[in-house]
Amino acid sequence: MATMADPPAGRAVDSATGTPTETVVEAEDLRMDYGPTRVLDGLGLTVRAGEVVALLGPNGAGKTTTIEILEGFRRRSAGRVEVLGQDPARADEAWRAELGVVLQSWRDHGVWRVRELLHHFGRYYAAYSTPERVRPFDTDTLLGRVGLAGHAHQQVKSLSGGQRRRLDVAIGLVGRPRLLFLDEPTAGFDPQARRDFHDLVHDVVDENDTAVLLTTHDLDEAERLADRILVLTGGRIVADGSAEQLATDLGGDSELAWTVDGRRSVHSTREPAKFVAGLYADHGDSVTDLRVTRATLEDVYMDLVRRHGSGGPANAAEYERKDR
Amino acid sequence: MNPATNAVRLGVARGWTDFLRLSTTPSELFGYIFYPLVFVGVAIGADLEHNETGADGSAYLMTGGVAFLLANTLLLLAQMIGSEREDGTLLRAKALPHGMIGYTVGKSLQLLLTSAVSLTLIIVASLVLVDGFSIQGWTGLLTLLCFCALGIMALAPYGAILGSLTTNPRMTVAVVMMALLGLTVVSGLFFPLDILPAWAGVIGMLFPLYWAGVGMRAALLPETQLAFEATGAWELPQAAGVLMVWAVVGFLVAPWVLRRMARRESGSRVSEARERAMKRAY
């Protein structure tokens, strides 16, 4: 693709490398109303091929609603959406074969064996296999990849919570999707399981050049997993960039603490250097114990959420119930 | 490879696997044996045989048992669909290309296999253990097969509809179970209707269970038992007619309700259903 003189229509050009990068998700002015409640209000986002994008936002911000619209599981109220070249609300089964959805299993397929279930689901994709993209994934390779090779012949219901999530990921990946959706992938994980899960997603995604859109309310997770973070609050995307970009560009307030004549003072400002200069001009050498704390990504995020407001029910289905 | 045909093949594989796996689960095995055991036990224990009219009460009761198992397909399907919506099985199918074809084929096959096993069990047990219960020649066998198929087609679609509409599968199954038990009484399934007021029989005749019972009696009881029938004859054409009307309406409405339900399934609905289920003690 990089050797082409002109990028084909419908492809964005990656500004950093100049190579044409295919857009896999594009949403414009997306709106979603549950009765009188507007959950998404003019949301726009783009995901390019091979990119890992985190949709970060507080509970009730509309993350799950957004992802379910993109998955084709929920109808939007208004706006333009294109996922892998089709409108999810009208997309066909061949389109579905290009997607991977990691669902949170509970007790479904409990009596199936791990390998048997993964193999069975994989066979649905065999009809869509091409020489360039052989599908499905080889069952045993994939089981090994997610660390379940030793559990292949166990019943699904005998797996631990963490093992089940690994199986969920394997099922999401078995069709070698071009785009993978992960909704709150590590909710309820302990720190070790969370780290293992992040490593797994990284590895599998790198190997297969799969684009990933994940939702999380965990900043740490977004920072660790994503190439790009979209902050969703108040029904729209209020920030878009890598973790470093967000922290730098959005600045946020730096916190200053100092002591003058034994009196401790604290002040927040967007321009710490200027403030410090003023401080010394006023008090000279009597300023002691000066400390400047730069805004972290977390501060930026909290600030964004506070400014744009959010709230509302924590779960998309809850909106519908209120609606009824 | 055509994706849709592939999905049909996978549906057959799924139905077979679900059937095999569940058939080797102790609780499911118990489900198979439970009804035959209860009905045969009551039929023998109550000693309803050869009372003064020459009518054979035990054999009559067992034909009702067979008809009741036909109605049980409604409960089975409501329970399967209701709980598989709740636990996310259905959403998984929806996330696969042509997964809903696979799911529908799989569930239909699973239901047919499960029904075939439980019907065979109760019929064989009755043939061996209950006097006066016998397949009435080749016409009887044909009648039995036709009315088993008709009965399932007239009843099962309504199970699919109920399973699609419920938000509490266990409660729905309990309520439908009570309703079915009520219907068995006004349908004259276990004992002749003449001991009940006439209006009860009229209510029963509106529902498919009554006519499934007629079909089973025609297939499994000798002509000497015709004295039980209100009209003194096996009303097979009427029975087939009523069952077909129920089947046609069911097969028109059920796919529409199922499609509507499936369209609305999503991750947040499943997790909401899960939370609801976990808050309930039943």
Image (cartoon, rainbow, N blue to C red):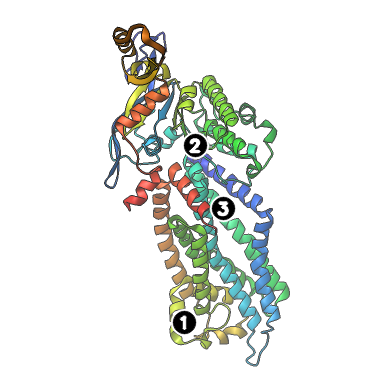
Do callouts 2 and 3 point to residues on the same chain? Answer: yes
Residue labelled with disc 1:
B201
Q: Does the image show residue A253?
A: no
* Mark 2 closeness class: few <14, some 14–19, many ≥20 residues within 10 Å: few
Residue in front for this viewpoint, A95 or B227: A95
Q: Can you say whether A171 is above or below B138 in the image? A: above
Q: Residue furthest front?
A: A261
User: What is the CA distance from the residue labelled 2 to the residue labelled 3?
Assistant: 21 Å
Foreground disc of the pair 2, 3: 3
Label 1: element kind = helix
Question: Tag 3 or tag 1, which sits nearer the N-term?
Answer: 3
Residue labelled with disc 2:
B2
Residue A86 is labelled as none
Q: Can you say whether B46 is above or below A94 in the image? A: below
Chain letter behind tag 3: B
* Mark 1 closeness class: few <14, some 14–19, many ≥20 residues within 10 Å: some
Residue in front for this viewpoint, B141 or A138: A138
Residue at (70, 80) in percent of width and height: B45
**Residue A256 falls left or right of residue B175:** left
Residue labelled with disc 3:
B109
Question: What's under tag 1, amino acid-wise?
Answer: Gly
Question: What's under tag 2, amino acid-wise?
Answer: Asn
> Where is residue B124 shown, x and y percent of the image?
69, 68
Question: What's under tag 3, amino acid-wise?
Answer: Leu
Question: Tag 3 or tag 2, which sits nearer the N-term?
Answer: 2
Do callouts 1 and 3 point to residues on the same chain? Answer: yes
